[in-house]
Image (cartoon, rainbow, N blue to C red):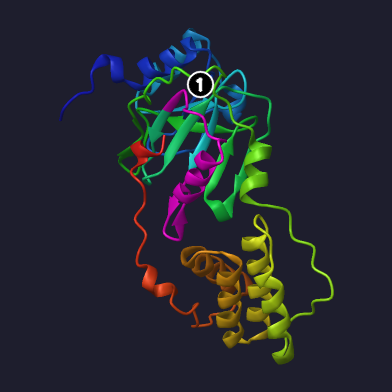
Amino acid sequence: MTRRPATDTALARALAYAARGWPVFPCCPGRKDPDTPHGFKDATTDPDAITAWWTALPARNVAIATGAPGPDVLDVDVRPGGSGYHALSRLRGAGLLQPPLAAVATPSGGLHLYYLGTSQPSGRLPAQHLDYKATGGYVLAPPSAVGGKPYRPLPPPPARGDRTAAPWLDWSAITSLLTPAQPSIRNVRAPGHADTGRLAAWVAQLPEGNRNAGLFWAACRAAEAGHPAALDTLADAARACGLGEREIARTITSARRSAGRELQVLPRRADRAGPRSEPDPEAVI
């Protein structure tokens, strides 16, 4: 068995993170569970305590407590039902994602993007497959591993001469972009056969920024009422207001799941778009 170099041991990495001002603590070997009595609350930058932890059990994983003085971390998940890479691309396009301080590939194929620590609370966007690790949170860091798969540091992004601001995330701005406020809906009842046309007309005139949320709401009502044909009509209306095939298919599928129905109807032509490949993790930073 090949031994890790001394500079790549859990103890060496933990001391290096602490030297950067990031509090660390041990997690159980091969797992994400804290191996201290009070979890992330036991995190420290004290080299003596850190040395004692990993000298006693060198195989422990290394965890970093997030939120100032530690880093804030954007956790991009990859799960069987989807990934956070599409949301990540939207954030970049909107100018809400600066190059991070560091980037780590996670065992699932996702990413941890490290930013300056703030006092913002941690948050989650499950539908977008994004977690925000800040105050009250923690992440495993290299050379930790879960299920035999390691957390791997990625090469730093190219230096940008035009970057003057420190790299930090505005979580409230991110949530506003990815989960816009529920559109105001008046005089629209849960659809019966006679209501499909009215719902479709409402979806067709939705303004940009409310289109996904509006289609989701309308599709949920149709699915709950058990009118699968209405989903095709709503999909056509969504095309008319400017939504793309992938967004339509994704939104209606989510609405069907949310409504708890196993309807076997998808938007017409949505299957022509073909499978979507996930971006290369190193290309999204």
| Residue 242 as seen in the image, left or right of residue 6 | right
Q: Mark 1 points at which residue?
A: 24
- Residue 63 coordinates in the image, percent (x, y): 48, 28
- Residue 232 coordinates in the image, percent (x, y): 55, 81
Q: What element carries label 1?
A: strand
Front position in the image: 11 or 221: 221
Q: Magenta stretch: give its range.
A: 77-102
Furthest toward the left, the residue is: 1
Q: Is residue 249 visible?
A: yes
Q: In which quarter of the image is the C terminus?
A: top left
| Residue 107 as seen in the image, left or right of residue 1 | right
Give the residue type at disc 1: Val
Q: Is residue 257 visible?
A: no
For residue 191: magenta?
A: no
- Residue at figure coordinates x 34%, y 36% from the top left: 282
Furthest toward the bottom, the residue is: 193
Q: How many labels does the image show?
A: 1
